[in-house]
Image: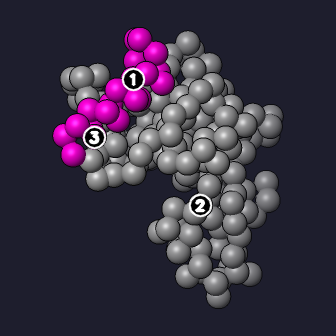
Amino acid sequence: MSYEDGAAFIIAFGTTYHALKQRGNLQKGDTLLVLGAAGGVGRAAVELGRVRGARVIAACSTQEKLDLCLARGADGGVIYPRAPFDKDGKKALSNLLKLACGPSGPNVIYDAVGGEYAEASSRDRLGGAVPGSRAWTEHDPKSSRENSAELLQLYSDGKIKPHISAVYPLLEGSRALADLAERRAQGKVVIRCT
């Protein structure tokens, strides 16, 4: 594994794998809706959803980002408008996401965006609890180790790979942060310390 892949790998893929496998119980044949699908964890969710046999619907803010997700294995997608939304805007976004997923809607929603997007994606869909994955490595280290071993095998088999949109030297770390803040990143941004 290259330095760049190693730097971008375990946080994005480890968190996402736990969320889809242990928390979301994503099964083969399920429909997975991924919000923020072009970002680091969103792209990991697209790839891991595909590996787990789900039908993956990528939700992105631009056509360019959606095209990247489709190239990485998403089965379909939708371009959502920018927030903030009024009441009608939230309802329109919810309908747009439902239309992209099909009549049964998504079985699992992976939300890497939050805020108004989360509310619209789960509107009339979940009804119950929304599971999180905070601090799970401390609470279940055995599952964490098993997940890491499975992820490394998937990487070795060429089934998953972090998408790195830019690599910056340490002295240009502020440019990396600007890429993230201004939503230019498509995948992970890596700062090289050497």
Q: Is residue 1 left or right of residue 22?
A: right
- Taking the spot 64% from the left edge, 48% from the top edge, the residue there is 64
Secondary structure at badge 3 equals helix
Kindly indicate the quadrant of the structure image that contains residue 91: top left
Reading the image, the residue beneath label 1 is: 98
Colour mode?
A: one colour
Magenta stretch encompasses residue 191: no
Where residue 185 is drawn, which disc sits there?
A: 2
Q: Position of residue 62 (x, y in %)?
A: 55, 48
Reading the image, the residue beneath label 3 is: 89
Magenta stretch encompasses residue 105: yes
Q: Amino acid at mark 1?
A: Lys
Labels 1 & 3 near each other (Cβ < 8 A)? no
Q: CA distance from mark 1 to mark 2?
A: 26 Å
Q: CA distance from mark 1 to mark 3?
A: 14 Å
Q: Earlier in the sequence, mark 2 or mark 3?
A: 3
Magenta segment: 86-106
Residue 110: tell me if it is visible: yes
- Of tags 2 and 3, the one toward the viewer is 3
Tally of marks: 3
Where residue 182 is drawn, which disc sits there?
A: none
